[in-house]
Image (cartoon, rainbow, N blue to C red):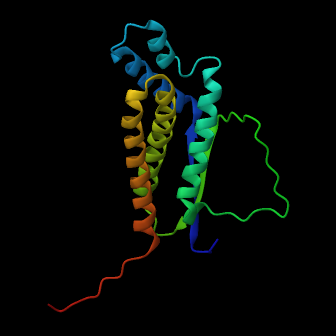
Amino acid sequence: MEASNKHVTINLLRKELLYDISNYSFVEGDIMDVDDEHKRHQTIDVCEDGNIDRVTRVLNLGHSEVVELLYPYTKRECADSDTRDNRLESRDVYLVDMYVPETFASSTVELLKNLIHEYLVCRVLADWMSITNPGSKEKWEEKMEDMRGKMRSCVNSRMVRLRRRLSPW
């Protein structure tokens, strides 16, 4: 970390992510054109017992993808000994810890917070719809990719300081 960097933390609350995921999946189930109520019920109950484990794993994966996507600002050295296992880890808060240049705008941090939230919601919904409502999967993947592209744009546009040459004409 350079001395000219500042520390920024984005806290994404699990309960807020689950609230949006539940709302969107309810709408998806409500507008489904099916005679099978069980299929509709499966789509709507994304955050219920049993299903929440899948949601948690996809949220964890999405969070890791975001941290990797923002690598220029989130990179940290590994410890001398770094051991991980695949136990299900449910977090109350998904942290995105960044060291950004002094000139990094607060508005960009706010934009990143909103993009990351939407990305994680869309990430879970794309996965869940692939299981319960395959016709809707592509829509959520497109939204997810749109959020990923916008995050990438934030990172790329802020990496190099622009210098404009002064011209007398």
Q: Quadrant of the C terminus?
A: bottom left
Look at the image and tell me whether residue 99 can be seen: no
Residue, x 79% and y 48% (percent of image)? 84
Count how many numbered circles sit on residues in the image: 0
Front-lying residue, 134 or 112: 134
Q: Position of residue 151 (x, y in %)?
A: 44, 54
Q: Position of residue 86 (x, y in %)?
A: 76, 40
Front-lying residue, 16 or 60: 60
Residue, x 49% and y 9% (percent of image)? 38
Tell me: residue 37, above or below residue 10: above
Q: Residue furthest bottom?
A: 168
Front-lying residue, 164 or 26: 26
Q: Residue furthest right?
A: 81
Look at the image and tell me whether residue 112 can be seen: yes
Tell me: residue 49, above or below residue 73: above
Q: Quadrant of the N terminus?
A: bottom right
Q: In the drawing, does residue 7 fall left or right of residue 138?
A: right
Tell me: residue 124, above or below residue 37: below
Residue, x 51% and y 40% (percent of image)? 120
Image quadrant in which you'd find residue 107: bottom left
Residue, x 52% and y 69% (percent of image)? 101
Q: Position of residue 72 (x, y in %)?
A: 55, 66
Q: Position of residue 24 (x, y in %)?
A: 42, 25
Q: Residue furthest left?
A: 169
Q: In the drawing, does residue 140 fall left or right of residue 8?
A: left
